[in-house]
Image: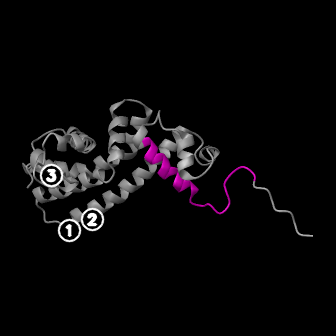
Amino acid sequence: MPAEPLLRGPGRPRGDSDLRARLLAAAEAAFASDGFDAASLRAIAFAAGCDVSMVAHYFGSKAELWRAVIDALAERQRLGLVALTEALAVLPADSRLRLRCGVEQLFNRIAADVALARMLLRETADAGPRASYIEARLTRPMLAVYRPLWEDAMRDGVLGSADVVVAHVATVGAILALIALRDTVVSLGALAGREADMAALRDEFCRGLFGLA
């Protein structure tokens, strides 16, 4: 007599090892477009193709899911900063050239996902535990890599003398705001008569704020 099929109990679905990654991707999109408070766990689970109970199974709570999204962003940023460090290592010891490379990499990384740029701008504008978590996981590690770049540019007169932290936060904030408001920038007539893509916007940013052609 054949054995009766086993009933699937609650918990992790069998044969679906990428479910956690799908939940993270769906949550990243939801938090970016809707913000933390408005993001729906049911909608996130639906987008990932599972029951909402799987959110609790893998992450425990909405707050823990949000932190996991930031941790994933931090890992992507870490890899990007490694690539930047390697790129800077092979450049000539020219502060202007090195600054242009660093600012381009920073702009490109933020521009890779406009919705995430808006989310980070929104989250960091409000003091609280989420802003503090972003500071610890994203802002401080990035500052550690960019600090020597800003300091060298200030020492060599490529940038005006300023507090390095202020210069870094102002630069990141300006890029976040410019990318988040890209449609407004274009509609006001910026880049008139030219291709209004991110590369053109980046070049204008480098010329306008840093005088880097």
Left or right, residue 156 beside residue 133: left
Q: Quadrant of the C terminus?
A: bottom left
Residue 128, above or below 45: above
Q: How many marks?
A: 3
Percent position of residue 80, x then y:
33, 58
Left or right, residue 94 beside residue 5: left
User: Which is nearer the N-term, disc 3 or disc 2?
Assistant: 2
Disc 1 or disc 3, which is closer to the eye? 1
Percent position of residue 118, x then y:
33, 41
Q: Amino acid at mark 1?
A: Val
Q: Amino acid at mark 3?
A: Asp
Residue 160, above or below 92: above
Q: Give the crowd class for mark 3: few <14, some 14-19, many >=20 residues within 10 Å.
A: some
Q: Quadrant of the N terminus?
A: bottom right
Q: Amino acid at mark 2?
A: Glu
Judged from the image, the secondary structure of the residue bearing numbered disc 2 is helix
Please report contact status of discs 1 and 2: CB closer than 8 Å, yes or no. yes
Percent position of residue 162, x then y:
14, 39
* Residue 90 disc label: 1
Q: Give the crowd class for mark 2: few <14, some 14-19, many >=20 residues within 10 Å.
A: few
Q: According to the image, label 2 marks what residue?
A: 86
Q: According to the image, label 3 marks what residue?
A: 152
Extent of the magenta region: 9-31
Residue at x 53%, y 41% (from the top left corner): 64
